[in-house]
Amino acid sequence: MFERRRAFSCLVGVALTASLVACGGGDTPGGPGPVPATPAPPPPPVVVSQVTGLAIEANVLGRVLVEATRSGTLTATVDWTFAENDVDVAIVGGDCSFEAFLGGQCPIVAISASTTAKPERISGAANAGTYTLFIENTGPGDETISYQVVLTPDASASASGRSGSSAGGQWKGRARTFVELQ
């Protein structure tokens, strides 16, 4: 009986030792390595420009400057009251004049000239800097619009070499009057 107990105790000891080695405890090679650092979450989106209830007559092209404080994605959402009206929107790089925009001389970040989308929503990559938002009410009637431009920053501080891309659409350019928007 004593021999059986002793054999059983030895087996239990061997099993415990084997399980500790398998778990990688102590200084055993192959144990768990350092815990990887959790990356910081990207900064939250920031509203860089917003207006509600702005009157804009038919065949008017308006513009407003917006500032991206760091690289990321600029997203513009423009909505209006009457579905029968067509409102188009574009974001271009720099402080772009009406004439330069209509002449195709400004780098397009995003553009939408859909006749059916309501609201119009566009987005494109942007580096830190100044951008111009163009909104055109092609009519047929006068309109009240609201717009919001949001910057969703990149996780890193800079994104060199980024360039804008077109969201599609052909600018109609029917406006006969140009206005600076708030």
Image: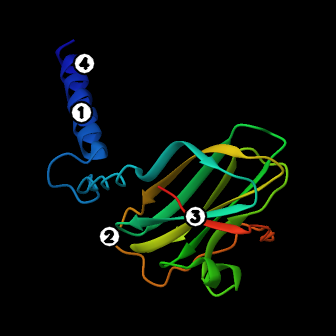
Do the numbered discs 1 and 4 sit on residues whose CB atoms are within 8 Å?
no
Residue at 85% in and 54% down? 115
In what element is the residue under mark 3?
strand
Cα separation, mark 3 vs mark 2, equals 35 Å
Q: Earlier in the sequence, mark 1 or mark 2?
A: 1
Which residue is at 74% across, 67% downward?
A: 175
- CA neighbours of label 2 inside 10 A, class few (<14), some (14 to 19), many (20+): few
In the rendered structure, find residue 4 and report the number of the disc placed on it. 4
For disc 3, the marked residue is 179
For the residues carrying marks 1 and 3, which lies nearer the camera in this image?
Answer: 3
Q: Which of disc 2 and disc 3 is earlier in sequence?
A: 2
Of discs 1 and 2, which sits in the foreground?
2
- The amino acid on which the numbered mark 1 sits, given as a three-letter code, is Leu
Q: Is residue 133 above or below residue 103?
A: above
Q: Amino acid at mark 2?
A: Ala
Label 2 vs 4, first from the N-terminus: 4
